[in-house]
Every structure is written in C-alpha cells, then in structure tokens.
Image (cartoon, rainbow, N blue to C red):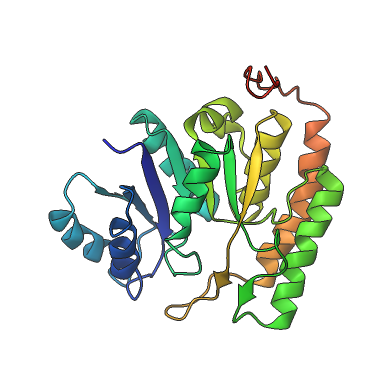
C-alpha cells in the first residue's frame, strides 16, 4: 500500500473529476485518492465509480447525503485514512486550482525537511494567484495577515486548502474537537497543529482559479473565517495543548 493518499472533496465537479484523478495517478510517486462526494446532482460520483474499475485498490469513494460542509468532508476523510494507516494525508481541490505536480513538493517538505504539516502557500513567495479578481486577492491576502496577527502563527497563507499532514498530527489534535465546518476549518487545523508544537512548512505554489465548474467561495465564507479566528484565540486560553516532543535531530543532537 502507498504511504500517501489525497483527499478530494467534491460537489458538482463532473467537468474536472476524471482529469484530476488521472493527473494524480500519472505522477512519478504513487498516491492513492479518496473522493468525498456530498451527493453531487451532476453525477460526479458516477464518474468516480466508473474510474474505480480502472484504478482498483487506488481510487476510493465515500458518498454522503447533501452538502455538509468542507470541514466535515475532510474530517470524514481523515478518519477514513487514519483507520487505514496512511502516513501522509493530503487535502486538494478538484478544480485544478492546485497543481497536482505540487503534491511531490509537499511530500518532500514532510519526508526530507522534517515538516509535520506542509502547506501549499500562495503568499510565502510574493502573491502567486492567477485569474482572481483583485478584490478577492486582497481579501484573501489580508485575511491571512489578520489571522497571523491574532494567532501568532508565522504562516503566510493561513487559509490555504492544499496541505499535507503526517498521520501523527491528525491523531494528536483530536479531530472530534475541531469546531468549524466551512473555510475557517482550514485556519483551525493549522492553528491547532501549531499550538501542539508541530512543525509547519510552507511550500510556494501558484494558485490558478478554476476554469471549469462553479466556485463555492463567497464573501460570507471569508466572514466566517475572520470571526472564527477570534473564537479560536479565545478558546485557546482555556485548553492545554501538550507540546510535541522534539526528536534528537530537531534538538540539534
């Protein structure tokens, strides 16, 4: 069994799903894929089922009833992957806004550079966003600045959704204690890993706005993230995060 799996949540992604699956399976490293589909009425799940005959034991599907939120989709996927003992568990969008080739760079950040969480970052090396309106770029960028100020995380792209987690991180942070279901979920996951003392590494990527299908992003989603971070900081005052023990290598021995 490969050591890595990519979780891709879907809702109405029939234009993209087959192409993204084939691109991931075409990489030089072997990744398995888990699709979490929230009852897409456009037949996304049917396309995945057809491809499962071609990619037996590599492509998996969990179907859920209706739209239940990005965070719950990932929590569902994380638990599925933990049970099957994958060492490296990835988040990635279905719409090619995340380049599948960058999975290799995120993997290397964990396996070669000692990262516990590798973040595909739009802002660690300038602003690398293609085909977004200026207003949306500014909203996203300054949202991350705001999150850094409130939380103290030294992460440039706090709302990034292209991430690799070591299984140990997901087992440690307590997925049942993750509060947020929308895009604030991405901030909460990074903040919780940070508070536990895990090493977060940002890997520069170029984020390209989707060409096919309809975006699920809107201003209310950003609003949830902005107000949610205040709640995260407040909750953190009342919870003790046992710090991850550093290895001899991390301590310089």
Q: Is residue 111 left or right of residue 33?
A: right
Name the residue furthest left: 53
**Could you tell me residue 236's position as x and y percent?**
79, 33
Q: Is there any visible trace of residue 172 in the rendered image?
A: yes
**Could you tell me residue 246's position as x and y percent?**
66, 20
User: Observer-nearest residue: 198 or 135?
Assistant: 198
User: Observer-nearest residue: 122 or 231?
Assistant: 122
**Could you tell me residue 245's position as x and y percent?**
66, 18
Q: Is residue 100 left or right of residue 55?
A: right
User: Observer-nearest residue: 249 or 139?
Assistant: 249
**Could you tell me residue 3's position as x and y percent?**
35, 36
Give above or below for 184 relative to 248: below
Q: Residue at point 18% right, 53% down?
A: 55
Quadrant where the image shows the C terminus:
top right
Q: Is residue 191 left or right of residue 91?
A: right
Quadrant where the image shows the N terminus:
top left
Q: Is there any visible trace of residue 63 in the rendered image?
A: no
Q: Residue at point 42% right, 43% down?
A: 77
Q: Residue at point 74% right, 63% down?
A: 223
């Amino acid at each position: 069994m490969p050591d890595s799996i990519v979780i891709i949540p879907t809702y109405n992604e029939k234009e993209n799903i087959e192409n993204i699956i084939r691109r991931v399976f075409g990489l030089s490293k072997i990744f398995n894929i888990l699709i979490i589909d929230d009852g897409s009425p456009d037949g996304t799940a049917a396309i995945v089922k057809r491809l499962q005959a071609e990619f037996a034991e590599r492509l998996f599907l969990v179907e859920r009833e209706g739209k239940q939120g990005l965070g719950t989709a990932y929590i569902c996927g994380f638990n599925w992957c933990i049970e099957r003992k994958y060492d490296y568990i990835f988040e990635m969008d279905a719409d090619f806004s995340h380049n599948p080739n960058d999975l290799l760079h995120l993997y290397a950040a964990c396996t070669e550079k000692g990262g516990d969480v590798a973040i595909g970052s739009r802002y660690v090396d300038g602003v690398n966003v293609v085909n977004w309106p200026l207003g949306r770029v500014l909203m996203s960028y300054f949202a991350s600045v705001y999150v850094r100020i409130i939380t103290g995380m030294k992460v440039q792209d706090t709302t990034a959704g292209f991430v690799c987690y070591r299984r140990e991180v997901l087992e440690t942070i307590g997925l049942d204690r993750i509060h947020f279901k929308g895009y604030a979920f991405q901030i909460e996951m990074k903040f919780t890993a940070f508070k536990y003392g895990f090493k977060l590494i940002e890997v520069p990527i170029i984020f390209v706005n989707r060409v096919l299908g309809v975006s699920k992003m809107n201003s209310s989603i950003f609003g949830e993230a902005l107000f949610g971070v205040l709640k995260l900081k407040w909750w953190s005052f009342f919870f003790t995060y046992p710090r991850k023990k550093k290895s001899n290598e991390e301590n310089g021995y």
